[in-house]
Image (cartoon, rainbow, N blue to C red):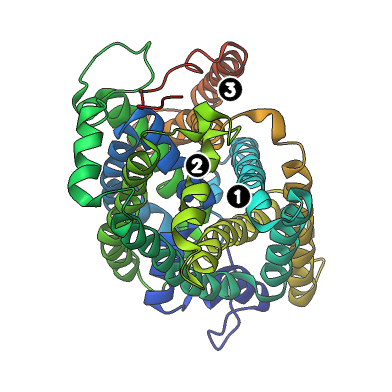
């Protein structure tokens, strides 16, 4: 656990990684709101609504439920530990550094892959619009975030996230207002009429029990709950922010405070997809060859409707960039905490000073930033951005949540039951994820538009 000196002042390392455990509540709430709402949400979710309907929106409704479960079930346990990294739980529960490090390795894999896609996706989408090579944008996103996260630690992450949240809301609202006013969209009534006419709204009520399908209400409820718990409930990125608050009650209040803004932001971002559908219904750019990836349709729409008004398209570009930077900075800071606490601290504790430990954490942040930026250069062949994230997060979420459920709710479980089940489930999920990429069974699944020659 973290050390405090005699007059209850936190150490420099604690200040760097945890913000001194005394951060203001409102900026922490905004930081939590932006951490998992990346450029992928801003670009991928409207594209998914455009192509396959609003089942993806149902997933965010389930995310609200998962946040409440986190607040009542997981957070009281983790906040009580007062530790920098939640993976320390496995020391208290099983007295096993091995399980702790195995879980930490999975978390690091989960985060580094997610971050590389978060860097790559908006860079590719913004590149043709800004007339800047995508590789330069990747470097700008990765290295700028690395710089301020390295210098400022968790406080820099939280305060920049707060400013970025304002830009995110502003950019999305600008797209919706200008979109509904555009004569080619035809207002709210036409947007809804086309969504119903094209069969997309009807998709929301698909209660099919089969698992061999792209999506359904039941798939969203079961898999969505697990995926969001892996993001909010047993994830270092979120728990680190909860633990930066002085008390458990404050941390729980923050979760309740962010439920409505989270739901509203996700809903309006998803609704952009229906506005894009109305705009492109009679001339789908994916079918005419104007764009190669459906993920780019949102940025194309935003450019068309916002550029006539000076400054608005710049606001939307800032919205995409803000969403990207907020996720990256949170990931880098949390990865540094996990690497130091889970793999280095037991060897270095007592052998280096507090200032040296802080410097080492800054070096780890830089390394994480460079690695994630480097991996972004190899993300091109992965396919659609939402598909990548859902596949990777879905494959890793099950074992991540299950190991904590086993430890917390099955008191008779021991080291070997936890170890074997964790290894077997992780291997099974890895196989399913790889097969999914090879087969790509839903590549031709999309709902129709009215495009004609």
Identify the residue position indicated by label 3 in the image: 423
How far apart are the two marked residues, 2 and 1, measured between alpha carbons?
12 Å
Q: Residue furthest bottom?
A: 7
Identify the residue position indicated by label 1 in the image: 122
Identify the residue position indicated by label 2 in the image: 297
Q: Which residue is depicted at the point 36% across and 71% down?
A: 247
Q: Under tag 3, what secondary structure?
A: helix
Q: Residue furthest front?
A: 453
Q: Earlier in the sequence, mark 2 or mark 1?
A: 1
Q: Quadrant of residue 452?
A: top left
| CB within 8 Å, label 2 to label 1 | no
Q: Nearer the viewer, residue 389 or 108?
A: 389
How far apart are the two marked residues, 3 and 2, measured between alpha carbons?
40 Å
Determine whether 286 is above or below 192 in the image: above
- Locate residue 278, reporting x and y percent: 32, 41
Q: Under tag 1, what secondary structure?
A: helix
Depth-wise, is mark 3 or mark 2 nearer the camera?
A: 2
Question: Which label belongs to residue 43?
Answer: none
Q: Earlier in the sequence, mark 3 or mark 1?
A: 1
User: Is residue 27 rendered to the left or right of residue 350?
Assistant: left
Q: Under tag 2, what secondary structure?
A: helix
| Quadrant for the N terminus in the image | bottom right
| CB within 8 Å, label 3 to label 1 | no
Depth-wise, is mark 3 or mark 1 nearer the camera?
A: 1
């Amino acid at each position: 656990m973290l050390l405090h000196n005699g007059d209850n002042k936190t150490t420099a390392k604690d200040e760097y990684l945890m913000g001194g455990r005394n951060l203001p509540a409102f900026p922490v709430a905004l930081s939590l709101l932006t951490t998992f709402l990346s450029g992928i949400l801003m670009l991928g979710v409207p594209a998914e609504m455009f192509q396959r309907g609003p089942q993806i929106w149902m997933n965010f409704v389930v995310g609200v439920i998962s946040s409440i479960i986190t607040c009542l079930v997981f957070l009281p346990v983790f906040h009580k530990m007062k530790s920098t990294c939640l993976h320390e739980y496995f020391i208290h529960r099983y007295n096993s550094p091995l399980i702790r490090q195995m879980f930490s390795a999975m978390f690091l894999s989960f985060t580094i892959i997610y971050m590389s896609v978060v860097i790559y996706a908006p860079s590719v989408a913004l590149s043709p619009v800004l007339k800047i090579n995508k590789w330069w944008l990747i470097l700008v996103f990765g290295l700028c975030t690395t710089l301020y996260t390295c210098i400022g630690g968790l406080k820099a992450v939280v305060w920049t996230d707060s400013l970025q949240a304002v830009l995110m809301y502003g950019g999305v609202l600008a797209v919706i207002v200008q979109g509904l006013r555009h004569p080619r969209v035809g207002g709210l009534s036409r947007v809804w009429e086309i969504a119903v006419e094209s069969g997309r709204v009807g998709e929301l009520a698909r209660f099919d029990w089969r698992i061999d399908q792209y999506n359904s209400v039941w798939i969203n409820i079961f898999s969505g709950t697990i995926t969001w718990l892996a993001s909010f409930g047993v994830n270092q990125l979120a728990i680190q922010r909860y633990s930066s608050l002085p008390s458990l009650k404050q941390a729980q209040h923050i979760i309740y405070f962010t439920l409505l803004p989270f739901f509203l932001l996700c809903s309006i971002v998803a609704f952009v997809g229906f506005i894009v559908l109305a705009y492109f219904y009679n001339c789908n750019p994916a079918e005419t060859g104007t764009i190669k990836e459906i993920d780019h349709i949102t940025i194309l729409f935003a450019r068309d409707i916002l550029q006539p008004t000076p400054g608005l398209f710049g606001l939307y570009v800032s919205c995409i960039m803000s969403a990207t930077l907020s996720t990256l900075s949170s990931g880098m800071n949390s990865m540094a905490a996990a690497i130091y606490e889970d793999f280095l601290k037991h060897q270095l504790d007592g052998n280096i000073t507090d200032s040296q430990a802080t410097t080492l954490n800054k070096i780890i942040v830089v390394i994480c930033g460079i690695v994630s930026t480097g991996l972004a250069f190899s993300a091109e062949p992965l396919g659609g951005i939402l598909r990548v994230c859902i596949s990777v997060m879905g494959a890793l979420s099950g074992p991540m949540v299950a190991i904590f459920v086993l430890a917390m709710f099955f008191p008779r479980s021991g080291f070997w039951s936890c170890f074997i089940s964790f290894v077997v489930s992780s291997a099974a999920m890895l196989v399913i994820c790889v097969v999914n990429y090879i087969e790509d069974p839903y590549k031709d699944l999309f709902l129709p538009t009215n495009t004609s020659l």
